[in-house]
Image (cartoon, rainbow, N blue to C red):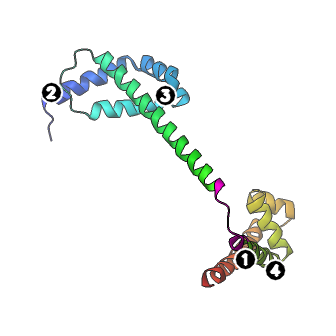
Amino acid sequence: MTQSPDRTDAAQGIEGVLLANRDRIVRFLEVRGAGDGAEDLFQDLWMRLTDRRTGPIAEPLSYVMRAANNLMLDRYRSTRQSELRDRAWGEASAMQSPSTEASLISREQLALVETAITNTGDRPARIFRRFRVDGLNQRDIASEMGVSLSTVEADLRKVYATLAAVRRQFDAS
């Protein structure tokens, strides 16, 4: 597949401008708020500008800098929209309180789950809580409890199987 000479010349022209002014463009993006993401944005800019079909550009550096500015505006708008959406969702979910019935059902289910975990045995229940609640990794738990890593894994599987059975009971009712 061959490209038209205009496309090739335009791409090489833009690529040449991007390569020759790389440091300047990255600094521009950093100053405009990209921070550590300036290099990634430069790559995005490169992809956007070299993938386009363009004709001759009178002021290629101005064109590239305008595209970089537009990229930053897009990024700012996207981040702002995301924050607004997250804030609105958080406010909406905070305003909704569960019904009394839902609260009672949840408490009963929690009690059943806690009982099921306890019934797996002291060590599996302790390992599960250290892993899932306290966030310790399995190797540290094994060292702390004086058991092998495979014992920790087996105990976790035991608790997970029990929780799966409890979940099936909840789903059935």
Separation (CA) of disc 3 from disc 1: 48 Å
Q: Which residue is denoted by mark 1 in the rendering?
A: 158
Q: Are marks 1 and 2 in contact (CB under 8 Å)?
A: no
Which residue is at a point 55% across and 27% down the rendered structure image? Answer: 35
Q: Quadrant of residue 46?
A: top left
Q: Which residue is denoted by mark 4 in the rendering?
A: 119
Instruction: Give left or right: position of 14 versus 98.
Output: left
Q: Are marks 3 and 2 in contact (CB under 8 Å)?
A: no
Residue 70 vertical position relative to residue 97 in the rendered view, above or below: above
Q: Which contiguous range is marked in magenta? A: 94-103
The residue nearer to you, when weighing 90 against 148, is: 90
Separation (CA) of disc 1 from disc 2: 67 Å
For the residue carrying disc 3, how many other residues have a C-alpha within 10 Å: few (<14), some (14-19), or many (20+)?
Answer: many
Under mark 2, the amino acid is Asp
Separation (CA) of disc 4 from disc 1: 11 Å
Please give the count of numbered marks on the rendered protein: 4
Under mark 3, the amino acid is Ala
Under mark 1, the amino acid is Lys
The residue nearer to you, when weighing 122 against 171, is: 171
Q: Which residue is denoted by mark 2 in the rendering?
A: 6
Q: Indicate which disc, 1 or 2, sits on the residue closer to the N terminus.
A: 2
Q: Nearer the viewer, mark 4 or mark 1?
A: 4
Q: Which residue is denoted by mark 3 in the rendering?
A: 38
For the residue carrying disc 2, how many other residues have a C-alpha within 10 Å: few (<14), some (14-19), or many (20+)?
Answer: few
Separation (CA) of disc 4 from disc 2: 75 Å
Q: Are marks 4 and 1 in contact (CB under 8 Å)?
A: no
Residue 53 vertical position relative to residue 149 in the rendered view, above or below: above
Q: Secondary structure at mark 2?
A: helix
- In which quadrant will I find the N terminus? top left
Separation (CA) of disc 3 from disc 2: 30 Å
